[in-house]
Image (cartoon, rainbow, N blue to C red):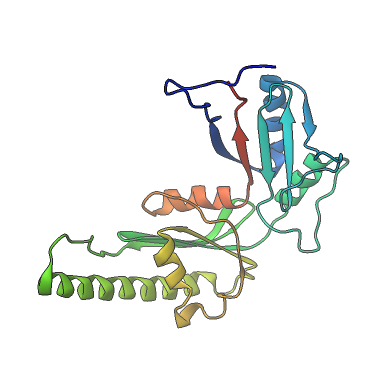
Amino acid sequence: METPAHGSAGKQAVPAARTAFVAGPRLAGWVERFAASHGALREDLDDEGVLLRAADGVVLRAADGATALLRAPWPVDGRPGRGSNSVERLASLASQERQLGIILLRRGGYAVGVASGGMLAASKSGSRYVQSRSAAGGSSQQRFARRRENQANALTEAVAGYAAGVFAGHPIEYLVLGGDAALSAAVLEEKALKEYASRTRLPFLAVADPNTTVLRKAAADACAVRIEVTDPPR
């Protein structure tokens, strides 16, 4: 039996993990390179030999113990991908052009857009100031908190209006939020986005301060296969 790897404190080392975003047409090449680096691949099976699957995804295990969890960018929704194996079908699914409404929001700025095929069809971005938290106490803290809340409310109301304008005329199927989770969720409570609030939300994106460049990358990532790679134990 092999001895588990341990850190300097005597604890078992935790395998390193990372996330990659790969467009559907590039998925086969990524899988080939993963196999070249880690050895022969097999789809993961449970103790009874049943294929393990993430929701709309595939679990690959390499000969050296590395794993890759491949998740589709969106649900099948009656439009499954085609192919002779799970990876081909996942790549086909991710290559479908579906309309995504994207809202990225942080205290200092916003970016909203419509994405399809990893590209932006329409967009708008800008800045809007919301004060940071203050360490002051007493009545000054209360006034600051009210001012900050008013600024945040004005921000979400404005961004909701911008998003509604950008989304108009596009058959938005899914929503993608990113940046500040609380502010992004608050935007969907605004009346301007009532029409879109019930759309299925795709995985949240961790992004830097929103701008046009960040929005372009978010559009590509939101339409790509999300791959969670766990390195082999040491």
Q: Position of residue 180 (x, y in %)?
A: 40, 59
Q: Nearer the viewer, residue 210 or 207?
A: 207
Question: Which residue is depicted at the point 47% across and 80% down?
Answer: 192
Q: Residue 182 occupies which quadrant of the picture?
A: bottom left
Q: Residue 109 occupies which quadrant of the picture?
A: bottom left
Q: Position of residue 141 (x, y in %)?
A: 15, 69
Question: Which residue is depicted at the point 62% across and 51% down?
Answer: 223
Q: Is residue 28 visible?
A: no
Q: Is residue 104 visible?
A: yes
Is 125 situated left or right of 168 in this image? Answer: left
Q: Position of residue 35 (x, y in %)?
A: 72, 24
Is 121 situated left or right of 80 in this image? Answer: left
Question: Which residue is depicted at the point 64% across and 71% down?
Answer: 171
Q: Nearer the viewer, residue 42 or 12?
A: 12
Q: Position of residue 233 (x, y in %)?
A: 60, 24
> Quick one: quadrant of the N terminus?
top right
Question: Which residue is depicted at the point 38% across and 72% down?
Answer: 156
- Point out the residue furthest to the top here: 2
- Point out the residue furthest to the bottom here: 191
> Quick one: quadrant of the C terminus?
top right
Q: Nearer the viewer, residue 107 or 144?
A: 144
Total residue callouts = 0
Q: Is residue 63 above or below residue 175?
A: above
